[in-house]
Amino acid sequence: MIYFQIQDKNGQILAGNMQGFSRMEDLQNNKNFSKHNKKGVGIKSVYLEIENISIWIVVENERDMLNSSKIFKKTVNIYKTVALDVAKRHKEQISAHAHVLNTLQGQIRQKIQGFAEDSKFYGDSYSESMSKIVKIIEDNKENAADLICYIQKRVIDMRAHLLGTEVIYLGGQYEIKPVSVSLKRAILNQCTPFINELENNKVKIRFFFEDDCKVLIDKNMFSLIMYNFFSNAVKYTKSDSEIRLNYSSDAKSLDISMISLKMEKSEIVSLSNNGVRGIHAHNISGKGIGLFVIQQALKLMDKNPMYISPNHQNNYSENNCVYNENHFQFLL
Amino acid sequence: MPDINLIKIENKFNNNFWYFLNPKNWHKKNYTKDNVNILFVDDLDMPVVDNLKKNGYRVKKVKDIKNIDDADVKNSQIIFVDFDGVGKFVSPLHQGAGLVRELKVRYEKSKYIVLYTAEPSMPTDTTMNELFNIADDRMRKDDDVTDFVDQIREGLKKLK
């Protein structure tokens, strides 16, 4: 059996199965240790520090590896490569989430500063600040309304991001609670942060189902799915076009079609993996998380994965990007 | 004993006097808050842009730069570039940091360029770290409006 443990420079365990090793405690103070016989009974333990991580590898009762230093060295080298990759991936993921949260809190803070400069409140008591803010609001009602709308949008962003993080990392522990939801309203709620940008790009959203159409679904997960869907749509939809949404209550199928960035048929499956970006998406910013979160949320709800069907018959070109009609189907 | 009158005369030769005495500076424009053009290159919403406008600065924001000879770039003296999501046309690999490099190579000291990021830490990768240091300064995207104002003031000094 091979046991390993990868830790960062702060001692945080990034990956490993060392908990299964019965003599883990005994070797804590002597991690470079070897004791085995020729029959392969015993252990060999190695501890290495490379770059900003440490790797601890223990081989127990593996005859070939314990008796051949060549095989042992090769195994250690493989673990070294894997460990560096794990550490890099871990850092990238933390960085991506921190990046989003930093951006959102910065946007909210700067927006508030634009409305009521915090330096004007230094040293004031809470009630003094309150009175000053009331005065500012009275004098700038439109700006106050703009601030509240802005914060509301960013809170939707933040909530979707935090829920998305939960789905990625704590997926199995989320308790699904299906409730009756107004489909159109639930979708429009999640469009809110993107409305301005869609309008600027002259992209219209058109619904082809009744306003009072209701579906039984987990509200949070559905919101998360729609948020990530529109977050992608705003980036990848061709300007001056339509996003058309249709719902069939018999088939319980939400169908969305739009003219958006070309997806090759060969890449459709891999696009749903964490961190994978489309072949044609190199000119557009993104982290390759959106589709992964959508598919994970559907999986949590025990629904089929989102079905993607590109139609390559008509291609459109704009800003060095190729667009075609793409269809997306959700079975709710 | 120093001549007290001589000291008084010496004090009249302040920085501006020596600045104008140098022929190199005769055709240089003196930038101030009122005539400096500031450009933000960021694919996301950046409320600090509106805040600076309210404070009387001439600020413009673009989502990306397709060409470093764009009119927006040429007309700006101070440029803030986001590290993420921009520079796709100029430097697809190194994004904002690559864009800053291209701008510095093309415009040298005639533009004051600041690279900002919402990343939790500066990159440890050597190539990227070198690119980060090409910018005149670096700052965090979520910094206060006052930090951006300080950065502009620093830019105005350097542009002189």
Image (cartoon, coloured by chain):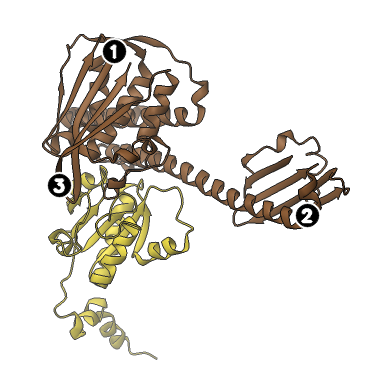
Chain colours: A brown, B yellow
- Left/right placement of residue A154 relative to residue A317 reads right
Disc 3 element? strand
Query: Compared to B150, does A187 lie above or below?
Result: above
Which residue type carries mark 3? Glu
- Report in which chain the residue with disc 2 lies: A
Residue under the image location 26 percent in, 50 percent down: A283
Q: Residue A125: in sight, yes or no? A: no
Residue under the image location 23 percent in, 53 percent down: B40
Query: Compared to B93, does A192 lie above or below?
Result: above
Q: Which residue is mark 3?
A: A318
Query: Compared to A216, does A119 lie above or below?
Result: below
**Residue A131, percent from left and from top:** 29, 28
**Residue A142, percent from left and from top:** 16, 30
Which tag is nearer the camera, tag 3 or tag 2? 2
Q: Are marks 3 and 1 on the same chain?
A: yes
Which tag is nearer the camera, tag 1 or tag 2? 2
| Mark-to-mark CA distance, 3 and 1 | 35 Å
- Report in which chain the residue with disc 1 lies: A
| Mark-to-mark CA distance, 1 and 2 | 61 Å
**Depth check, front residue: A196 or B50:** A196
Q: Which residue is mark 2?
A: A68
**Residue B132, percent from left and from top:** 39, 61
Which badge, 3 or 1, comes first in the chain's sequence?
Answer: 1
Looking at the rendered structure, which numbered label has been put on residue A252? Answer: 1
Label 1, residues with CA under 10 Å away: few <14, some 14-19, many ≥20: few
